[in-house]
Amino acid sequence: MDSERIGIVVGLTAEARIARRSGCRVEVGGGTAAGAEAAVRRLLAANVSMLVSFGLAGGLDPSLPPGCLLVPEWVLTGGRRIATDVSVNQRLGGFTPHGLLGAASVAASVAEKRALWAATGCAAVDLESGAVAFAASAAGVPFGVLRAICDPADRDLPPAALAALDAGGAIGFWRIMVSVLGNPGQVPGLVRLAGDAKAAREALVVRVGERFRR
């Protein structure tokens, strides 16, 4: 299939830079569920024939380390379990035996992640996959998910990580600095998160190179 007919939804501009190496159409949701919905609408208006939710995810399964790649069999969103497409999963490297939670808000604390893992059985959570799953199901378009674990289940997200994004999905340095000045104790957590994010991005780069060549 022509890569230009594949539409990829990401949350962050950093994820978009990786996804664009595939030659596919890419839209940025800005790290919100509403932004992801708008990104999907733009892709469908461009007549893509396949949708992919791509990028980083928060770990819920405590056995999954940073950089672990997931191609989930299903997405749970709005209380509905929506299966991913077999052919899309093959294009993404083959499914992994996981479910993914498409959430409306970030699971920032270990306690939140533990509760979601127990309640849903989902291995990971992100803010874009739910919108992609709903829209693909409604439009009759096959979809899949390729996500890399960033913040694992046993780590809280530092407050600066929640404040960092702007509406376009870019990380604002000054937003981080303001948060750190108000709470210097989060610096070690931010350093760990940076390392985790690097591992996740590197895993995505490798998979894109392996699977999306024309």
Image (tube, rainbow, N blue to C red):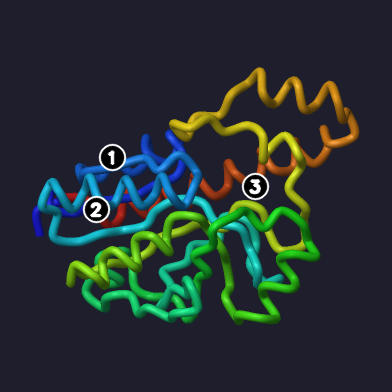
Q: Are marks 1 and 2 in contact (CB under 8 Å)?
A: yes
Residue type, label 2: Phe
Disc 2 target residue: 212
Decide which of tag 2 and tag 3 comes sooner along the chain: 3
Q: Residues within 10 Å of mark 1 (few under 14, many from 20)?
A: few
The image quarter in which residue 21 lies: top left
Near-viewer residue (12 or 92) = 12
Q: Residue furthest right?
A: 185
Near-viewer residue (188 or 116) = 116
The image quarter in which residue 177 lies: top right
Q: Pinpoint residue 180: horizontal percent, then vertical percent.
A: 80, 26
- Image quarter in which the N terminus is found: bottom left
* Residue at figure coordinates x 67%, y 58% from the top left: 107
Q: CA distance from mark 1 to mark 2?
A: 8 Å
Q: Are marks 2 and 3 in contact (CB under 8 Å)?
A: no
Q: Which mark is residue 208?
A: none
Disc 1 target residue: 21
Residue type, label 3: Asp
Q: Is residue 48 above or below residue 166?
A: below
Q: Residues within 10 Å of mark 3 (few under 14, many from 20)?
A: some
Q: Is residue 185 above or below residue 149?
A: above
In the displayed structure image, the side of residue 157 where residue 46 appears, left or right: left
Disc 3 target residue: 196
Q: CA distance from mark 3 to mark 1?
A: 22 Å
